[in-house]
Amino acid sequence: MQPTPDLPTLLAIYNQINHYGRTNGMELTVTHPGKVHYTMAVQETHLSSPGTCHGGVLAGLMDSALGAAALSLAFTTGELVSTVEFKINYLHPVYLHDALVAQGMVEHSGKTLVVSSAQIICPGRDNLVVARGMGTFNRYPASKRGFHELLFPAEEQG
């Protein structure tokens, strides 16, 4: 059995393949397996009305934080995750140029499912919690989706 890559290596791989996060200006930090922070700033392309962020942008950030928390834990055993379901409660509107921090953490990790929770805060507005969410994720071996080669590159033959 091959050793599982360390979290910095896994984070680098994830950032390389996560086009959604890069496109939306999102930056992921893994505090430790099962606990993450995602940051982003609301841009004009995120607006649904003058000055107000579209709820789908917050839903995307929420799903990303929930999933990254689950993924950071699953990575430690050579597994990946996929979203089964998630819910979000929108508590306050978000505006153009608001900086957002999504804080995600694993609440439960079983053999096949991981449950995580997250909140999105706006530090520039006295850490106002603008949304809360919870999600369930299916865990599966990385080899099932062809990620095995990314996680365990073939050793160079000398």
Image: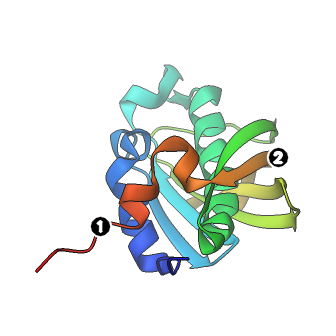
Q: Quadrant of the N terminus?
A: bottom right
> Which residue is pictured at 36% across the width and 48% down the height?
17
Total marks placed: 2
Q: Amino acid at mark 2?
A: Thr
Compare marks 2 and 1 and give the one earlier in the sequence. 2
Q: Position of residue 104 (x, y in %)?
A: 70, 62
Circle 1 crowding by C-alpha within 10 Å: few under 14, some 14–19, many from 20: few
Looking at the image, residue 38 sits to the left or right of residue 77; the answer is left
Q: Amino acid at mark 1?
A: Ala
Q: Position of residue 94 (x, y in %)?
A: 61, 40
* Secondary element at image label 1: loop
Compared with 5, 111 (above or below) is above
Q: Residue furthest front?
A: 158
**Colour scheme shown:** rainbow
The answer to whether residue 103 shows anywhere in this view is no
- Residue that badge 1 annotates: 154
Q: Position of residue 83 (x, y in %)?
A: 71, 40
